Amino acid sequence: MSTYPPKQHQDNNINHMIEVIKHYPLATIISVNQNIPFITHLPLIYNEAGKLIGHIDKFNPQAAFLKNNNPITVIFSGPQCYISPSIYTTNQLPTWNYIKVHLTGTVKAIESKEVLKHSIIKMTEFLEAPLHKYVLEPDNPRMLGALDYINMFEITINSWEGKFKLSQDKKTEDIKNAKAELIRANTESMEHFLNKII
């Protein structure tokens, strides 16, 4: 476990970290080969065996390192925002609050096309919850045609780090205000950002 951030901003509760993974499944996966980092952003699903399952385009250069028990680093990012001193009841400096989960592990390729197909269907089912407006059928021709171009992999997790910087070192009222600001800022900034680019 890293000594940074300070202890009050670390959360060692694996259940809390799993909640981050389930609610924010788009991960940053990092492989290193000959001191060159390979970085991809893709959804990973935490399964009942306690492993992470993912799929990657076989033409992605990082795909070559997602096998053979190669080491990997994975980052999941939860909500984050700037915290203005104006929201506190006490005298503070500006800061940034965030939730991150850092994992290290080893990765191996899953070669079976049938397992890959089932995994894609299960991932879609998970991501469609709770309304399940779309169901990916096993005989979907577009999925069947894509199987030759997708590599499936499984990550065994070796270490967990929860970095939850949420003003825990402040007074109770200030912690509540910081939580409310995190909720407000993430809701408003998403709408403002998307309206600018779309």
Image (tube, rainbow, N blue to C red):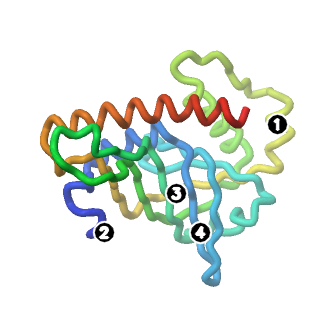
* Residue 69 rendering spot, x and y as whole percentages: 55, 69
Q: Earlier in the sequence, mark 4 or mark 3?
A: 4
**Residue 140 against residue 40 in the figure, above or below:** above
Element type where label 3 sits in the image: strand
| Residue located 71% across and 37% down the image | 197
**Residue 197 against residue 137 in the figure, above or below:** below
Query: Mark 2 highlights which residue?
Result: 2
* Residue 17 rendering spot, x and y as whole percentages: 36, 46
Q: Amino acid at mark 4?
A: Ser
Q: Is residue 193 left or right of residue 96?
A: right
Spatial separation of the CA atoms under disc 1 and disc 2: 43 Å
Q: Nearer the viewer, mark 4 or mark 3?
A: 4
Q: Amino acid at mark 3?
A: Ile
Q: Earlier in the sequence, mark 2 or mark 4?
A: 2
| Residue located 42% across and 48% down the image | 50
Label number found at residue 31: 4
Label number found at residue 155: 3
Element type where label 4 sits in the image: strand
Spatial separation of the CA atoms under disc 3 and disc 2: 21 Å
* Residue 196 rendering spot, x and y as whole percentages: 68, 34
Query: Mark 1 highlights which residue?
Result: 144
Q: Amino acid at mark 1?
A: Leu
